[in-house]
Image (cartoon, helix red, strand yellow):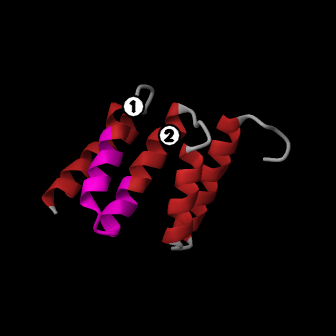
Amino acid sequence: MQETDKKPIHASAYYGLARVALLEKDLDAAERLFQKSLSSEPEAFDKAWDLVYLGRLAIAAGENDQAVLYFQSAFDLEGATDKARQEARQGLEMAKKK
């Protein structure tokens, strides 16, 4: 990240670090890093997945209203992949059931 000041590249780096934090089961760090990615002007691919993962973390925290907002934002995002939209749709269904 020190090699460039391009925000989308920083966003991708934060996204990757957030995924590592999830693998290590550090949910607080993962949430913080996904949020940092969102605030770093990510490309649509990363932004959609940031929102999907934040929605999943919100469900895990019992914050279903916030989860719905994240999933809906991912679903509506122009440039989101079909897979991200599919995951967002499933997340919406899960959040609304709880």
Q: Nearer the viewer, residue 18 or 28?
A: 28
Q: What crowding class fits label 1: few (fewer than 14 Cα within 10 Å), some (14-19), or many (20 or more)?
A: some
Looking at the picture, which amino acid does disc 1 mark?
A: Leu
**Does residue 64 lie above or below 9 as drawn?**
below
Q: Determine the residue positioned at 43% across, 54% down.
A: 53
Going by the image, does 98 lie left or right of 20?
left
In the displayed structure image, the side of residue 7 where residue 94 appears, left or right: left
Overall secondary structure of the magenta section: helix
Sequence-wise, the earlier of marks 1 and 2 is: 2
Please check the rendered image and state whether residue 65 is part of the magenta-colored stretch, yes or no: yes
Q: Which mark is residue 77?
A: 1
* Residue hosting label 2: 47
Q: Residue at x 59, y 36 (%)?
A: 41
Point out the stretch of residues depicted in magenta.
Answer: 55-72
- Do the residues bearing badges 1 and 2 touch, measured as CB atoms within 8 Å? yes
Q: Residue at x 14, y 58 (%)?
A: 97
- Residue 85 in sight: no
User: Three-letter amino acid code at disc 2?
Assistant: Lys
Question: Which residue is situated farthest in the right direction here?
Answer: 3
Q: CA distance from mark 1 to mark 2?
A: 8 Å
Q: Nearer the viewer, residue 86 or 10?
A: 10
- The answer to which quarter of the image holds residue 85 is top left
Q: Please identify the residue farthest to the left as the structure is shown.
A: 97
For residue 84, above or below residue 63: above
**Residue 8 on image: x %, y %:** 65, 36
Residue 61, position as x, y percentages in the image: 34, 69
- Whether the magenta-drawn stretch holds residue 74 is answered as no
Helix, strand or loop for disc 2: helix
